Each structure stands twice: as C-alpha cells, then as structure tokens.
Image: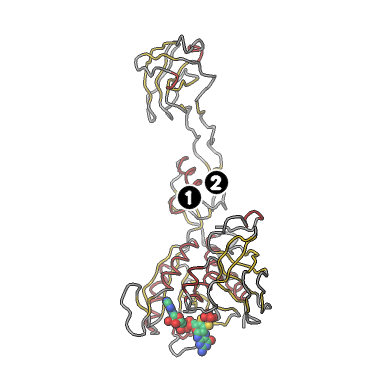
Amino acid sequence: MKTVDEHLADILGRIEPLPPLELQLLEADGCILAEDVTSATDLPAWDNSAMDGYAVRREDVLAATEDVPVELPVVGDVPAGSSQAYRVQPGQCVRIMTGAPLPAGADAVVPVEWTDRGVATVAIRKPPTEGQHIRRRGDDVSAGDVVATAGTRLGPTHIMLMAAVGRARVVVRPRPRVVVISTGTELVEPGAPTGPGQISDANGPGLTAAAREAGAIVYRVGIVPDDPTTLLDAIEDQLVRADLVITTGGVSAGAYDVVKEVLGRLGTVAFEQVAMQPGKPQGFGTIGPDGTPIFTLPGNPVSAYVSFEVFVRPAIRRMLGIEPVHRPQLPAACTAALTSREGVRQFLRGRLRMLDGRLAVEPVGGPGSHLVASLARSDALIVVPEDVTQVPAGGTVTVLSFGTLPHGDAEADGTGRDG
Ligand SMILES: Nc1nc2c(c(=O)[nH]1)N[C@H]1C(S)=C(S)[C@@H](COP(=O)(O)OP(=O)(O)OC[C@H]3O[C@@H](n4cnc5c(N)ncnc54)[C@H](O)[C@@H]3O)O[C@H]1N2
Ligand code: MOO
C-alpha cells in the first residue's frame, strides 16, 4: 500500500497554481495578487478638511477667546464633493464639511463646536493651531506608490485601498472552479423522500461547502447513478467549466463500483490503496483535453471528508497559489486512550479545548467511516502515525484543526491556524 505522504507528494507534484487572470476587484477578494499594484493618484487627492467647521486664515482668529470671540463673514459653503474653487481672503472664512477641498488661502479649520454655527457671519471662540484639521494631499499615498505587492492575499483592507486609489480590476491567481459529483444509484437529493434502500446525498453538499471554504468556486452536479455511460457523459459535460473534479463513491471492490471501472479504462487515473483509515481507496489523475485533475474519493462520508482534508484541500490551495497549503498540525494532550492499526495512518475525530493551559483533544465517536454525526461534533482530526498502535490517556498526539482553535491560545507559539 502507498503511504499518505507518497500519495500527497504525487498529487502536489502534478498540481500547479492557476495562471494569473485579470478580475474585478470584488471577485479577487481572497485571491493571491499576481502583480504589483501602483497608485495612479495621490491620496488624499487634494488638501481637505478633517472636520465640519470653518476654513480660516489662522492669523485672523489668533485673538479669539471664550469671552471675546472673533467674528468673521462666511463667504462660501463647501460640502464634500464640491467642485467650486473658493479663496479665503484676509478677514474672511468659508464654511466647510469633512472631506471637502480646502479653499485657497485657508491654513486651518475651526471645528463647528468652537463657534456659534453662524451662516452669514460666524463667532469663533478659540484659535486653531497651524494646519489644524487639514488632511494634506498625498499624506496617505503618493502617485506612483506600490499599494499592494504581488503575492499578497487580498482581503477587505486591500480591496478598500485599491478601490480608494480607483483600481477596478487586478491580476490575481483566480479561484479554481471545482466540480463535485456524487455517484451512487442509492442516492437521492436531500429533502426528497427516501424509498427502500435509498439515502440522502451527504457528500455532495458537504464537499461543496468544504471546497468553497478552501477558496474554490464550486459547481455541485446532481447525483449520478452507477451507470458507466451516464457517468462518463456527466464528467465530460462538466470538463468545460472545471479546473478540478471531485467524485465520491464507486472506487472500492464492489460489483457496481463504476467510477473505478469507467475512469480506470482511460488509463490516466490511478486507483490505489493508501495506508490510512478512513480513506483507503483513492483515485487521482487527469482527464480530458486539458488534463483536468480529478480526485475520486471513497463514498463513505467520513472517508470522503477526511480524504478532502488530507489530499484535495492542499491541491486547491496550491491552485490558488496560497502557502502553506496544509492546515497546521498541533500537539495536543489526548484525553482518552486510543488504539490504531500498525502500518496505517489513522485520522480520528476529536474536539479541541484548553486543559490546564494546554491544548487538549477529546476523541469523538468511533473510527467508523459512516459516523457523520460525530464528524459534525468534531473540530479536528487526531492523526495517529503508522508506527503508533497505542496512545495512553494524557499522551501527546498531533491534531489537524479544521475549526476555530479554543481560547487560550495555541497561536502564541506560532503554530496557530492559517485561516
Ligand atoms: N470488499 C471490500 N469492500 C470494501 C472495501 C474493500 O477494500 N473491500 N473498502 C471499504 C472502504 S475502506 C470504503 S471507504 C468503501 C468505499 O466505497 P466506495 O468508494 O466504492 O463507495 P460506495 O460503495 O459507493 O459507498 C460506500 C458507502 O458510502 C455511502 N455513500 C456513497 N456516496 C454517498 C453520498 N454521496 N452520501 C452519503 N453516503 C454515501 C454508500 O451508500 C455506502 O454506504 O468501501 C468499503 N468496502
Ligand atoms: O478506508 Mo474506508 O475510507 O475506511 O471507509
């Protein structure tokens, strides 16, 4: 049998980051920038007011006090967005709103709270300091500045900055388009009535959500029965919009294991047994004219989810150009004794918490690969290596966290989640 590490190395050796593409700013959220973005403008683009108030020549109001305010005529009114060019002559002022362009001649803004809020004339009770409440042109960004460098993973703050400098499109590594196909004649859509022998498709929705969480754009294809022609047609139909295909079911040794039968014939997808539990039967390869990668995951829901975490998620992250591709693996104290089969890497479900200031993991449910309820109660996989057959209660294990880490906090030592 192949080891988990060998299988993962084979997969990652054949997955490349997607070629860069120019996308609308919002479509690029979460993607890796593939260019240095340079600002074409200064930010702010002109001197402007930081407060609602009055633009003044400071020397005119130096004598202002609470008891003896200085009165000035208000010769104009500039709201934000005003394009009117005002000039403040000696002995005058202009009413101004936050963000509005500073009139020529003014060298300070008196906030409205220091005045009687006059419209024709205003009484000012306190002198401003030099340049008070003026935001200078270019004090944030100068034209020509690089505002985001290639390699940055774009998030809301980068999107905000690029929008502020007027960029509508950026070149990024796009999100991979992932097609998820559930195979199995026994499957029905969740919500549809189940007849004798029928079950709801759990893998399709579950893996769609998982691939989306990993950063992909996901198309979930309806259920495909265990029929070779229907399956081949369904896969071929999807190839036009897929950067990666995931199927579940039909890869073990049964009489109706049609995925293996159909794709095995093509010769480009290898079906192998990997020394892990769950997730032993795995298929990976490429199909179609563009050599689209395909993962054929086992049908048991927990096997499918664990296989996704261990093999598919890193591949999606590689396509996105995101490093590291793996979730962090953290040491944790295991609250109960465990046993595992020699020669097999076991991925058990666990729930993380802090115990005496240390990260601890409590095993949840048994090892059965049909136990979706305990999978949903867990937030980590407990990874028992191939050469370990016993873990005593309180022993240290490695956990792969796929939820939010408990408070307390494991990130302090630099081993926290990467999100
Ligand atoms: N004789 C052998 N039998 C099995 C072996 C083996 O080596 N020899 N391996 C077992 C292991 S391990 C696994 S894992 C499964 C993998 O089976 P398949 O990938 O062929 O999947 P199916 O047979 O189609 O289904 C298995 C199981 O999962 C349920 N299932 C399938 N798809 C879904 C879905 N979309 N949503 C919910 N549940 C699903 C299906 O009904 C079966 O109960 O094979 C073992 N057998
Ligand atoms: O290896 Mo299977 O994936 O145990 O259920």
Disc 1 crowd, CA 10 A, few/some/many (<14, 14-19, 20+): many
Front position in the image: 135 or 329: 329
How would you rate the neighbour count of disc 2 (Cα within 10 Å): few for under 14, some for 14-19, many for 20 or more? some
Q: Which residue is mark 1?
A: 170
Q: In the picture provided, is 313 more to the left or to the right than 2?
A: left
SS at circle 1: strand
Q: Are marks 2 and 1 in contact (CB under 8 Å)?
A: yes
Residue 354 position within the rendered picture, expressed as x and y whole percent measured from the top left:
60, 60
| In-front residue for pair 247/309 | 309
Asked which secondary structure carries label 2, the reply is strand
Please say if 18 is above or below 225.
above
Q: Which residue is painted at 65% across and 69% down in the image?
A: 397
Q: Nearer the viewer, residue 71 or 360?
A: 360
Of all residues, the one furthest to the bottom in this rendering is 255
Q: Position of residue 10 (x, y in %)?
A: 60, 74
In this rendering, does residue 263 appear at all? no
31 w.r.t. 188: above or below: above
The amino acid pointed to by label 1 is Val
On the image, the x and y values in percent for residue 411 come to 62, 55
Amino acid type, callout 2:
Ala
Q: Which mark is residue 334?
A: none
Quarter of the image with the C terminus in it:
bottom right
At x 50% / y 63%, what residue is drawn?
A: 214
Give the residue pinned by disc 2: 148
In the rendered picture of this protein, how many numbered marks are placed on residues?
Answer: 2
**The quarter of the displayed image where residue 401 is located:** bottom right
Closest to the camera, between mark 2 and mark 1, is: 2
Q: Quadrant of the N terminus?
A: bottom right
Relative side of 217 to 405, left or right: left
